Amino acid sequence: MRLAVRVTPRGGRDAVEGWTVDDAGRAVLKVRVAAAPTDGSANAAVIALLAKALKRPKSSLRLVSGETARLKLIEAEGLDEAGLAAAFGPRPTA
């Protein structure tokens, strides 16, 4: 499964703030990180945060694009919408 991850720098603790679905029906996670999203350390923080929240090894997640952007595309091996719902709540309605 590919996830879009919208990264917002807010300082404090790293957290997943929820998820939504874009116009094409793809999952978009809203993530807050202490590091600036254009900093390479933000990429590591996002992967670590998602691995912990999804209860998956970091090696199952891969940054596909967005190395230095606020919107990143992550490939999550073996993840489906049921896994997202278990971690972050049911699919948001429009």
Image (spheres, rainbow, N blue to C red):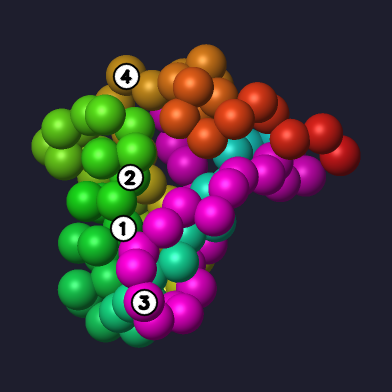
For the C terminus, which image quadrant? Answer: top right
Above or below 23: residue 39? below
Label 1 sits on what residue type? Val
Which type of secondary structure does the marked residue at label 1 adopt? helix
Magenta segment range?
A: 1-24
Residue 75 seen in the current view: yes
Tag nearer the camera, 4 or 3: 3
The residue at the far right in this view is 94
Residue for badge 1: 46
Q: Which residue is mark 2?
A: 50
* Residue behind mark 3: 12
Q: Secondary structure at mark 3?
A: loop
Taking the spot 34% from the left edge, 39% from the top edge, the residue there is: 53
Q: Secondary structure at mark 4?
A: loop
Check the image and report above or below for 35 versus 1.
below
**Front position among marks 2 and 3:** 3
Look at the numbered discs 1 and 2 and tell me whether their residues touch, using CB distance below 8 Å: yes
Alpha carbon distance from label 1 to label 4:
18 Å
* Residue nearest the observer in this picture, 84 or 2: 84
Q: Which of label 1 and label 4 is nearer to you?
A: 1
Q: Is residue 13 left or right of residue 72?
A: left
For the residues labelled 1 and 3, say whether their Cβ atoms are less than 8 Å apart.
no
Numbered tag placed on residue 33 in the rendering: none
Q: Which residue is mark 4?
A: 78
